[in-house]
Amino acid sequence: MSGAPKQLIALLVLGVLAAVVPSATATASPSAPASTTVVRRVTLLTEAGHLRPRYTVTAHGRGHCWTTSTVNGRLYRCFEGNLVVDPCWKLTGHRAVVCLAAPWRTRVLRLRLTRRLPATDSYGPRVWGLRLGDGLGVRCTMSQGAGGTVGGKGISYFCQRGWVLLEEPDRSTPVWTIDTAKWAKGHYEPKGSHHLTDAWKAVVH
């Protein structure tokens, strides 16, 4: 070994280190099984009722809120023209609400209110968004209306890349699971149960 070239010795040392020290890429692999489903609380507002710094208003409109949100009875479901926006948060000191299309987004719609807000309710917060595990990484948001059925089970969440989630998650273990289906050849094909790595809930603050 004493006569081995320096390049060969360096390669041998690197090989030993690679075998002993786990790489960051391997640790963060999307196919690695989650130990628990992480529940993330989402709000656009500070405790004082103002927009949090991480969010940016990128669209303005006029409209009204006619009922409470489908994901939290203390938030609002509103109209901007013919567009339904849900959930929306009331800004303190302004005749306006701010709305978010998906829980992982940071771009916000600010809606100037043309009518008084309805009374709030006490239900929720319900699960607004979910992310599939098992190497898929697909994000899903709660269906805002009639979503149809697959194999007799109702579609409850619509996802990226043609996936849908059926009924509600099974929360009996630390890692939640849910039945899934995917659009193919003109219809949804059942894809069995998958793990969920993340769940998002909309809260007031």
Image (tube, rainbow, N blue to C red):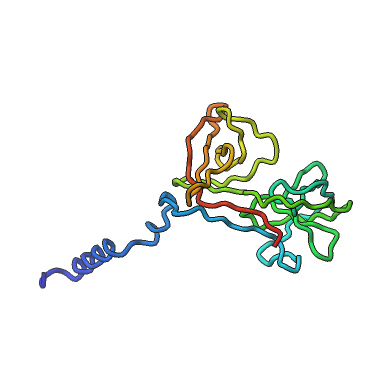
Instruction: State which quarter of the image contains the N terminus.
Output: bottom left
Name the residue nearer the viewer: 57 or 67: 67
Instruction: Report x, y in % for residue 118.
Output: 84, 51
Residue lying farthest to the bottom in this orientation: 2
Q: Is residue 194 above or below residue 26?
A: above
The residue drawn where x is 77% and y is 43% is 83
The residue drawn where x is 62% and y is 39% is 156
Name the residue nearer the viewer: 199 or 79: 199
Instruction: State which quarter of the image contains the C terminus.
Output: bottom right
Q: Is residue 32 above or below residue 183?
A: below
| Numbered marks: total | 0
Instruction: Report x, y in % for residue 117.
Output: 85, 53
Instruction: Report x, y in % for residue 23.
Output: 35, 61
The residue drawn where x is 56% and y is 39% is 165
Name the residue nearer the viewer: 8 or 162: 162
The residue drawn where x is 75% and y is 66% is 50
Q: Is residue 29 left or right of residue 124?
A: left
Q: Is residue 14 left or right of residue 141?
A: left
Instruction: Report x, y in % for residue 98.
Output: 76, 57
Q: Is residue 78 left or right of residue 106?
A: right
Name the residue nearer the viewer: 29 or 89: 89
